Every structure is written in structure tokens, then in C-alpha cells.
């Protein structure tokens, strides 16, 4: 009799358990249907009800997180996802979903922590490695990012995304040759991979291969999608080196259009043997320059033209009356608002008061950097009046 009573109790409990599970499944399915209809508030109630009927129902918490996320309630979504992980820690994607919600909230440290937890739980969680690496790269920790991206390439050797990310990190470490290898691999695995082509262009710029850099810019332009065109424009702007834009004759006291002439024609003060006079030549740059670099006189070179684009000083004729041209200026000023440099230097009369100068064939060369630390473009860091344009 006692045994029969016990069996009845177990049967009743089993029936009750079945009823609760059925109710949980009904509530879950109802919530999923409401999600499809975008009735997220009602879906939240249904998923909560499902979790009450069956507290260990993983799907109830996961869908609850999705519903909260759809409502823009990020904190609540994170809490729901964490409850789901508490029941089942093997849900790899949830770690990344939580991290993305933290990222949306600007909580990078929390995002990194949950991704690290995901990797500890499963060493094969490729998405967690990739997302963590992206966060580290964004924070400037390229070395750590590199380590995580190398794991991605090991786990997914036929996926171009891992090689792209690794190349991007290597660019950040200025290991450009290695970056070129990884990015070339990425592009071979994924056709028209605009982001990888952009990074490849940056790597070629890093090793000073301007032809290959231009090839990537053209390649992106030829792909023609809005994304590719955006990358093409960005790569061109990012890697463009500063140039001398033009010679400003209005702000100059020495006109570089003048040919060979006596110093006396420039300034009557040269009537005195050995007299010295200062002259200023103004140049404008095509980008914002580093003021300290521009004003460093040793970054400037002044010379007499020796042929080629600059022509020949005094048309190739040598005269003992030619006065010396200083190698460096006396001083240089820079106006950041106009990007204008004023180069001031001295000329000295000879003892016979018949010194000559050829302003048109005086070459001015700048070897400094712009505000972003970029060196001058060698196709536009010199100027003289004979050429009439920077070269």
C-alpha cells in the first residue's frame, strides 16, 4: 500500500513536470512568433513566462536577450544572455553577442573580458578571437591583436578575413613586409576584398613602393562599389605626401622670375663692397605642415641649378662675378593659417661691386615633414623660377 502511494506521488510529479515543460515550450513558441511579427514587448513577456515554467530553458533566456536587444534595451539584453550562459556555457556566439552590446555602450574593457571568457571556455571560438583582436587593434595594442588573429588563421586557414586582420595588425606594428604577405593571401582567398586591398596599399606605402601603392588605389577604383571607391579615396588621401604648392611672388622680396643680373639692380645698398642684404622667398604647401620642421633651417637647401628640370645657373656660363648662394637660410617663418613658409637668406656683394646673381636658377628644396609626420613627396619638394612649378 505504501509503495503504491509512492508511485502515485512520482507519477503526479512527473505529470506536473511534463505540464510545466509543455507550458514552457508553448510560451517559447509564442514568443518566437511574436518576434517574427516584431511585437518585441509581448515577446519579452512570453520568454519570461517560459523561463518561469522551466528555469533551465536555455532558449528562453537567449530569445529574451534578442527581444531586449531589438527594443534597444542593451543592459537587459546582456543580463538575459548571461543567464543563458549560466545554464549553458558552450554557446560560443553568445560571448560575441554580449561583447557587441558592450561595444555599443562604449564598455570596451567589459567586451574584452567577456570575449576572453569565451576563449577560455572554448579554445576554438574563432569569432571571439577575431572580435577581441579587432578591439585590441582599435586600442592600439597591435601585438596582442596579432596573436589573436594568428589563432584565427590557424582555425580558419581558408578564410580571407583572418589574413586581412593579421595584415592590418602587422601594419600597425610597422612590419610592412610581413603585412604584404598576409594581405596578399587574404585577397587570393576573397575576390575584390576592398578592406584588404586598402591595407595592402598602406603596407606598400610603408615600404616606400609608390608604384604598388598606386596599383592598389587604381584596383579599388576599378572595383567600383561605393565601399571600394571610399577605400580608394581614403588610401589616396592617407598616403599622399606633402608638396610645395606654389611660389608666392607677392610675399617675396626676391622675384624668382628674374634672370642673371647685378646685385645693384636688386638693392642700391649693394653699392658698398662686401655689403650683405637679406631677401625673402615665400612658398605655400598643399597640406598642413609641422611648424617646427618648416622653421628648422637645416631642413632647407638652397643651391644653384645644375641642369634638368631646374635648368643651368647663369645658362651654364661661369663668371667670376657670380656671388655665392647660401646653402641654408638665415631663418624661416611659417603661417599655419595660410600654410606659407617665408625663407629668408642673405646675399653678399663682392669687393668690386659688380657681383651678379641669377634668381631664376636658384633652387629651393625642403626636406621636412607635415603635421602628420609624413616626409615630402620627392616629386614636389623643390622649386625654382626656371621651372615655374614645384618638382
Image (cartoon, rainbow, N blue to C red):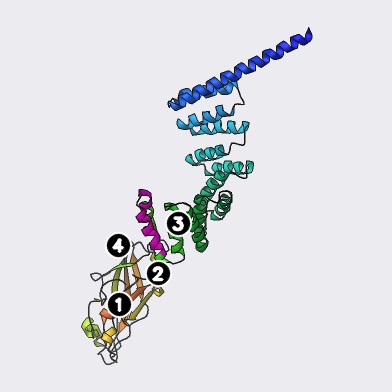
Q: Main secondary structure of the magenta part?
A: helix
Residue range highlighted in magenta:
212-229
Q: Residue at image x 24%, y 87%?
A: 271
Quadrant of res 89: top right
Check residue 199 in the rendering and tell me which mark sits there, or answer none.
Answer: 3
Instruction: Identify which residue, 269 or 146, lies in the foreground.
Output: 146
Mark 1 or mark 3, which has the lower sequence index? 3
In the structure shown, which secondary structural element does the residue marked by tag 1 occupy?
helix
Task: Tell me if 106 is positioned left or right of 287 in this view.
Answer: right
Residue 104 percent across, percent down from the top left? 47, 40
* Residue at image coords 46%, 63%: 206
Badge 2 element: loop
Name the residue beneath numbered marker 1.
309
Disc ID at residue 368: 2
Per the rendering, the mark at residue 338 is 4
Q: CA distance from mark 1 to mark 4?
A: 27 Å
Front position among marks 2 and 3: 3
The tag earlier along the polypeptide, 4 or 2, is 4
Picture coordinates of residue 134 (x, y %)?
51, 49
The span from disc 2 to disc 3 (Cα, nearest Å) is 26 Å
Badge 3 or badge 4: first in the primary sequence: 3
Relative vertical location of residue 306 with respect to residue 218 in this rendering, above or below: below
Judge whether 192 appears above or below 85 on screen. below
Q: Quadrant of the C terminus?
A: bottom left
- Residue in the image at 45% along x and 63% along y: 204
Q: Nearer the viewer, residue 87 or 158?
A: 158
Most distant residue in the right direction: 2
Whichever of callouts 2 and 1 sits on the residue coming sooner in the sequence is 1
Q: Is residue 320 left or right of residue 291?
A: left
Is there a contact, CB below 8 Å, between mark 1 and mark 4? no
Label 2 neighbourhood size at 10 Å, few (<14), some (14-19), many (20+)?
Answer: many
- How far apart marks 4 and 2 lie (CA) works out to 18 Å
Amino acid at each position: 500500500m505504501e509503495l503504491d502511494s509512492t508511485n502515485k506521488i512520482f507519477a503526479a510529479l512527473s505529470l506536473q513536470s511534463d505540464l510545466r515543460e509543455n507550458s514552457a515550450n508553448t510560451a517559447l513558441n509564442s514568443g518566437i512568433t511574436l518576434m517574427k511579427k516584431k511585437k518585441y514587448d509581448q515577446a519579452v513577456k512570453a520568454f519570461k513566462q517560459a523561463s518561469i515554467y522551466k528555469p533551465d530553458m536555455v532558449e528562453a533566456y537567449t530569445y529574451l536577450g534578442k527581444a531586449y536587444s531589438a527594443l534597444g534595451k542593451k543592459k537587459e539584453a546582456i543580463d538575459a544572455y548571461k543567464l543563458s550562459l549560466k545554464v549553458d556555457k558552450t554557446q560560443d556566439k553568445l560571448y560575441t553577442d554580449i561583447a557587441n552590446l558592450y561595444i555599443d555602450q562604449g564598455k570596451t574593457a567589459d567586451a574584452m573580458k567577456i570575449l576572453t571568457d569565451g576563449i577560455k571556455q572554448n579554445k576554438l571560438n574563432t569569432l571571439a578571437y577575431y572580435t577581441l583582436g579587432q578591439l585590441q587593434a582599435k586600442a592600439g595594442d597591435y601585438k596582442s591583436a596579432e596573436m589573436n588573429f594568428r589563432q584565427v588563421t590557424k582555425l580558419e586557414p581558408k578564410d580571407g578575413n583572418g589574413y586581412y586582420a593579421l595584415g592590418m595588425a602587422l601594419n600597425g606594428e610597422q612590419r610592412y613586409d610581413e603585412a604584404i604577405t598576409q594581405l596578399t593571401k587574404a585577397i587570393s582567398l576573397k575576390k575584390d576584398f576592398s578592406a584588404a586591398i586598402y591595407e595592402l596599399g598602406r603596407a606598400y606605402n610603408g615600404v616606400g613602393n609608390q608604384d604598388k601603392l598606386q596599383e592598389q588605389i587604381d584596383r579599388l577604383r576599378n572595383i567600383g562599389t561605393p565601399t571600394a571607391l571610399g577605400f580608394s579615396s581614403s588610401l589616396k588621401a592617407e598616403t599622399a605626401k606633402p608638396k610645395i604648392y606654389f611660389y608666392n611672388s607677392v610675399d617675396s622680396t626676391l622675384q624668382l622670375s628674374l634672370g642673371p643680373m647685378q646685385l645693384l639692380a636688386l638693392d642700391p645698398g649693394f653699392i658698398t663692397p662686401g655689403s650683405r642684404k637679406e631677401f625673402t622667398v615665400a612658398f605655400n604647401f598643399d597640406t598642413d605642415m609641422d611648424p617646427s620642421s618648416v622653421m628648422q633651417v637645416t631642413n632647407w637647401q638652397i643651391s644653384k641649378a645644375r641642369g634638368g628640370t631646374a635648368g643651368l645657373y647663369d645658362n651654364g656660363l661661369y663668371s667670376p662675378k657670380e656671388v655665392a648662394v647660401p646653402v641654408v637660410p638665415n631663418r624661416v617663418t611659417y603661417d599655419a593659417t595660410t600654410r606659407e613658409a617665408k625663407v629668408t637668406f642673405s646675399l653678399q656683394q663682392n669687393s668690386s661691386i659688380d657681383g651678379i646673381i641669377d634668381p631664376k636658377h636658384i633652387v629651393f628644396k625642403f626636406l621636412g615633414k607635415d603635421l602628420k609626420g609624413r616626409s615630402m613627396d620627392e616629386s614636389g619638394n623643390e622649386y625654382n623660377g626656371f621651372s615655374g612649378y614645384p618638382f
